[in-house]
Amino acid sequence: MSQAKSFSNNVNIMFDRAADLVDISPGLREKIRVCNATYTSRFGVRLRGEVHTFIGYRAVHSEHMEPVKGGIRYASSVNQDEVEALAALMTYKCALVDVPFGGSKGGLCIDPRVYSTDELEKVTRRFAAELIKRDLIHPAQNVPAPDMGTGEREMAWIADQYSQMRPTDIDAKACVTGKPLIMGGIAGRTEATGRGIQYALREFFRDSTDVTRAGLSGSLDGKRIIVQGLGNVGYHAAKFLSQEDGAVITTVIERDGAVSAESGIDIGALKNWTQENGGVSGFPASKYTSPLEAALEQECDILIPAATEGVIHAGNATKIRAPLIIEAANGPITSDADQILREKNCVIIPDLYANAGGVTVSYFEWVKNLSHMRFGRMQRRENEARNELIIRELDSLSSALGKAWAPSASFRKEFKAGANEIDLVRSGLDDTMRKALQEMRAVLQDKDGVSDFRTAAYLVAIEKIAESYRVRGH
């Protein structure tokens, strides 16, 4: 039996498949592919009366753009290969969606569930200090964000630690993104990756050729969806798709099992249930199953793996019955499984595009922090006044012409209102996701040898990175 490929090997195999189609020198190709550097930190923290030693990593994959960008995840499974693979995906992801960052990633070997809030704060600040001392957290060089096991709380601790160590840095808030609003965060960052999944699927369903390629028809309305992982990304994607697009979440898979309901699962209710009961087991009006892979193999229209890497592999890929998969997690499909699924004509919307919503909105937050002003502050009321003037003129015109024009009060209110920060963030994210998929679609249609979205996405990213090196004279 062949040994399973590592995460970084899987990423490199997918990279190489696209790079074979790009006219670049072997030297430049290797420069783009390899991880520049990885820092490993082993540090001690006194907890519960004794010193506990932790291992943390920060990988920098590419500095063709700076700062480099990438989240910090907390999990007991974190290792060097994983953070280097994730850093590589960040490089390609940022290039694909035109976010001017290089790729980085961090991780700490820790199970956050077994530590108190005070203990996690001590560990986080100690890890942050190790990275800050080496400029591996810095607004102009390396900007972390939340990832699996971390969130606004941890980012707030990191930002505060940076401010304490660099008190004269006027741009200190830009050292990390995904912060609470009160600390310079941005509206819409928590939902960003899940919202990006929604916008990606909306753009996919705008093109009948894409939809037909997946063996589907129509719109998102009524599409049966399986979501694997009800963390931040999976929850928001499922919530938006079901509440705003009419999709039906038929199955949700979590650590302790899966729940299914053909009529659809109330995602908000299920989220509350898992928070109160520690899992999905026992959720009312649903069927519970414990073999997770069996739930992954159920029939559906769209499968959304939104948890961790490698959940679809050579051992179960032949049993997957979803005609369309959108990778909300990083690396949920191995390279072997990817080949099997492509041979089955399964359409895959790849991770380096699909989950780019997080880094896109992180970019908006970073820009906000550097400008020291929230989006919309200067123009919102001016836009509101202009829109009110338009409504008045239309009222006057309809009166002069003797024609009835009586829009509803809700229309008047919505039309008049100027865009606030979250409106602008969502607009920017929607535009980003549309443009990137359109670029991938053009490559898929016009480039010889490209027959899937993943290869198209890598090809677009590689060409942009290569051009970045060329114009710099590297």
Image (spheres, rainbow, N blue to C red):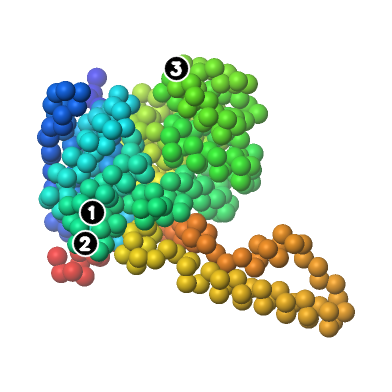
**Quadrant of image for the N terminus:** top left
Q: Are marks 2 and 3 in contact (CB under 8 Å)?
A: no
**Residue 302 against residue 195 in the figure, above or below:** above
| Residue underneath mark 3 | 291
User: In this rendering, which labeled residue sits more in front, label 1 or label 3?
Assistant: 1
- The residue type indicated by label 1 comes to Ser
**Residue 425 against residue 344 in the figure, above or below:** below
Tell me which residue sits at (35%, 33%) in the image.
Answer: 308
| Residue underneath mark 1 | 163
Crowd band around label 1 with a 10 angstrom C-alpha radius: few (<14), some (14–19), many (20+): some
Tell me which residue sits at (44%, 31%) in the image.
Answer: 229
| Left or right placement of residue 342 versus residue 18 in this view | right
* Residue 235 in sight: yes
- The residue type indicated by label 3 comes to Pro
Q: Are marks 2 and 1 in contact (CB under 8 Å)?
A: yes
Q: Counting residues from the N terminus, which is met first, the one under dot 2 or under dot 1?
A: 1
Residue closer to the observer: 264 or 88: 264
Disc 1 is placed on an element classified as helix
Disc 2 is placed on an element classified as loop
Quarter of the image holding residue 221? top right
Cα–Cα gap, marks 1 and 3 = 47 Å
- The residue type indicated by label 2 comes to Asp
Image mark for residue 169: 2
Q: Counting residues from the N terminus, which is met first, the one under dot 2 or under dot 3?
A: 2
